[in-house]
Image: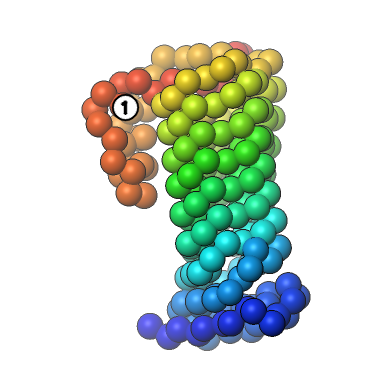
Amino acid sequence: MKEYVIDAKNMDEKELNRTIKQQAPSHDRIIINNPESRHNICAGLTEEVDIQINGSAGYFVGTMVNGAKIHITGNAGWFAGDNMTEGELVIEGTAGDGAGQGIYGGTVIVKGSTGSRTGEIMKGGTVIIGGNSGFMTGLLMMGGKLIILGDVTEDVGESIMRGTIYVLGDVKSLGKNAVMDKTTPEDKKELEEILTEYGFELTDSDYENFKKIVNMQ
């Protein structure tokens, strides 16, 4: 495996992203040290390369990524994984508002909690939140799966059109067009396959307790 290490300490955002894109075609893995919460890290990256960010990232990390696998050991700011088409973004800590906003495909995983509007206008793919999520989670959702293992506050699924939201914890209130539906055995099996793949260990009782939120149709 060919690795390339970037020390981002004295780089601005443009220089950092230019270096990532220059090195991605000839390396399997890029390690970024001292990211210091810079914004737009890996924006528009189209190479199938593994990226490890040792620390926290700012706004729009992994925006418009197509194929890369990004692992952040710290936290992320707003709109992590925005408009991803293919790939994977794993955040070990927390993320701000709009995690997984507008994704077409791929997977966004936040091990901790997120802010508001998680999965907003997502069209496909999967977003998994290991903690809690804020208001209007799944706002204007058009497709894909949004899985929340903690609690969700007000207006879940506001104006949802398509796609499915699963919540293991408490749901404070549903938004317009959103209704609770029956979680089927097929849903539970699919949830177990997805969550197990990403290292989430749940009990049989947990899978029985998932709430399913969809468009009222």
Please state, as top left, top right, bottom left or bottom right, where the N terminus lies in the image. bottom left
Query: Disc 1 residue type?
Result: Tyr
Q: Secondary structure at mark 1?
A: helix
Residue 216 can be seen in this image? yes
Q: Where 20 sits versus 199, above or below?
A: below
**x, y (%) of residue 49?**
50, 72
**x, y (%) of residue 87?**
52, 58
User: What residue is at 54 percent from the left and 48 percent from the top?
Assistant: 94
* Residue 205: quadrant of the picture: top left
Nearest the camera: 161 or 116?
Answer: 116
Q: Which residue is mark 1?
A: 207
Please state, as top left, top right, bottom left or bottom right, where the C terminus lies in the image. top right
Q: 13 left or right of 30?
A: right
Q: Where 62 sits versus 123, above or below?
A: below
Q: Where 151 sits versus 53, above or below?
A: above
* Residue 175: quadrant of the picture: top right
Q: 126 left or right of 120?
A: left
User: What residue is at 65 percent from the left and 35 percent from the top?
Assistant: 116
User: What residue is at 31 percent from the left and 27 percent from the top?
Assistant: 207
Nearest the camera: 214 or 8?
Answer: 8
Rendering colour mode: rainbow
**x, y (%) of residue 155?**
65, 20
Q: Residues within 10 Å of mark 1 (few under 14, many from 20)?
A: some
**x, y (%) of residue 89?**
52, 56
Nearest the camera: 112 or 52?
Answer: 112
